[in-house]
Image (spheres, helix red, strand yellow):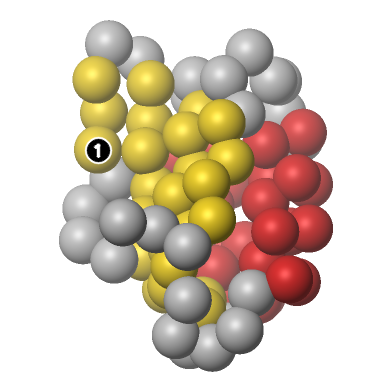
């Protein structure tokens, strides 16, 4: 179970990433964050976000009918 969840379905680029940045700023090291987005750009935008914010992806990106789920951990 993630410490934070952001359901960004229906939001278009760059909103899922901008909202994710706000959540990441609130996180403490070791906490996890689930980002759910249906914007295909999120799949390409999340890895650079992780590099910039000191976070990592836990496991693989899950995709179900065009909805992407990312489990992110703050290092």
**Eyeballing the image, is 29 above or below 62?**
below
Q: Residue at horizontal 49%, vertical 20%? A: 38
| Quarter of the figure with residue 24 | bottom right
Q: Would you say residue 39 is visible in this rendering? A: no
Q: Would you say residue 75 is visible in this rendering? A: yes
**Eyeballing the image, is 2 above or below 50?**
above
* Image-based side of 2 in relation to 60, left or right: right
Q: Is mark 1 on a helix, strand or loop?
A: strand
Q: Where is residue 56 in the image (x, y as percent from the top left)?
A: 42, 73
Pointer 1 local density, CA inside 10 Å: few below 14, some 14–19, many at least 20: few
* Image-based side of 41 in relation to 65, left or right: right
Q: Residue at horizontal 78%, vertical 58%? A: 22
**Eyeballing the image, is 65 above or below 15?**
above
Q: Where is residue 16 in the image (x, y as percent from the top left)?
A: 67, 36
Q: Where is residue 57 in the image (x, y as percent from the top left)?
A: 36, 65
* Image-based side of 31 in relation to 13, left or right: left
Q: Which of 1 and 60 is in front in this view?
A: 1
Q: Where is residue 14 in the image (x, y as percent from the top left)?
A: 76, 35
All told, the count of numbered labels is 1
Q: Which of 19 and 4 is in front in this view?
A: 4
Q: Nearer the viewer, residue 24 or 57?
A: 24
Instruction: State the quadrant of the N terminus.
Output: bottom left
| Quarter of the figure with residue 29 | bottom right
**Eyeballing the image, is 24 above or below 46?**
below
Q: Residue at horizontal 70%, vertical 20%? A: 12
Q: Name the residue under label 1.
A: 62
Q: Residue at horizontal 61%, vertical 84%? A: 28
* Image-based side of 72 in relation to 13, left or right: left
């Amino acid at each position: 179970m993630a410490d934070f969840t952001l359901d960004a379905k229906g939001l278009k680029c760059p909103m899922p990433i901008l909202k994710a940045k706000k959540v990441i700023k609130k996180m403490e090291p070791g906490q996890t964050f689930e980002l759910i987005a249906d914007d295909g750009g999120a799949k390409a935008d999340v890895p650079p976000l992780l590099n910039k914010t000191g976070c990592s992806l836990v496991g693989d990106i899950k995709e179900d009918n065009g909805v992407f789920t990312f489990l992110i951990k703050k290092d």
